Amino acid sequence: MQLTPKFSVAAWAEAENAKGHFCACGCGQRVRVLPMHRNNGIPKYIPEHSPSRFGAEIQALHDQGLMTAADLAKELRLQRKAVHPLADEIIGDTPRVGSRQIRIFTPKQVAKLRAELAKRAHPRHDLTDAQWKKVAPIVSRSPKQRSGRIPDERGIVNAIRWILRTGTSWKAMPDRYPCRSACQAHFYAWKLDGTWAKVCQVLA
């Protein structure tokens, strides 16, 4: 007696992907079929192009030349969590529209934010020699504690202050500062052991 092969949902999804299902919006991108679609049905659109109510609201705002907080974070290379505090500080409250109360920004407001960020990113905000004399004893390690390559601690402090001042993502950090991974590692370590709190105290 010949046994019927056991049905595999994963194999079904693979076979459907081999057939080729394309986004119904006409963009030409493939819809990725997953095992869960066996019960839920194969989507007609890729997630980004689904004509949902929320997506339609966003598109309508874009058509008017307006930007959302998510758009602003991408445009100005900001950390998502920094957008709203920064906007509150620089331009104040802005309208919220739609079913999800989406915060919107006009091109003029975006230009104002961009100009302010450019000012804050200027090297003149880096530590002065007098400030570094106060900070150096806090962040500099003794020769006995050092191993491997000696980090540019002044540059790292400047980089961290730049990130906190601008709200920009680490990826957008200027080349004049040490490498991003070193700056991030020092910042998190200093926050954890209280070093950064001491730096802020002496610079206050």
Image (spheres, helix red, strand yellow):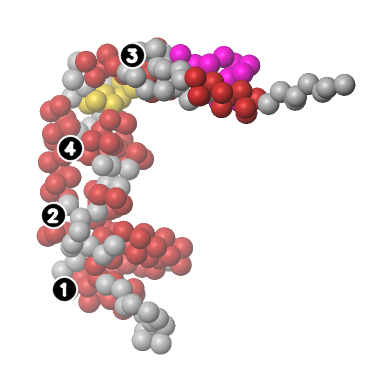
| Rendered-image quadrant of the N terminus | top right
Looking at the image, residue 161 lies above or below residue 101:
below
Is residue 86 something one can see in this rendering?
Answer: yes
Q: Amino acid at mark 3?
A: Gly
Magenta-colored span: 34-44
Circle 1 is placed at which residue position? Answer: 129
In the rendered structure, find residue 113 and report the number of the disc placed on it. 4
Work out how far the residue at label 2 is from the one at label 4, CA to CA, in angstroms.
15 Å
Work out how far the residue at label 3 is from the one at label 2, CA to CA, in angstroms.
45 Å
Work out how far the residue at label 4 is from the one at label 3, CA to CA, in angstroms.
36 Å
Q: Amino acid at mark 4?
A: Leu
17 within the magenta span: no
Q: In percent of the image, x 32 and y 18: which residue is there?
A: 27
The residue lying toward the viewer, choosing from 1 and 110, is: 1
Q: Earlier in the sequence, mark 4 or mark 3?
A: 3
Q: Earlier in the sequence, mark 3 or mark 2?
A: 3
Work out how far the residue at label 1 is from the one at label 3, CA to CA, in angstroms.
59 Å
Q: In percent of the image, x 27 and y 47: which residue is there?
A: 168
What secondary structure prevails in the magenta region? Answer: loop
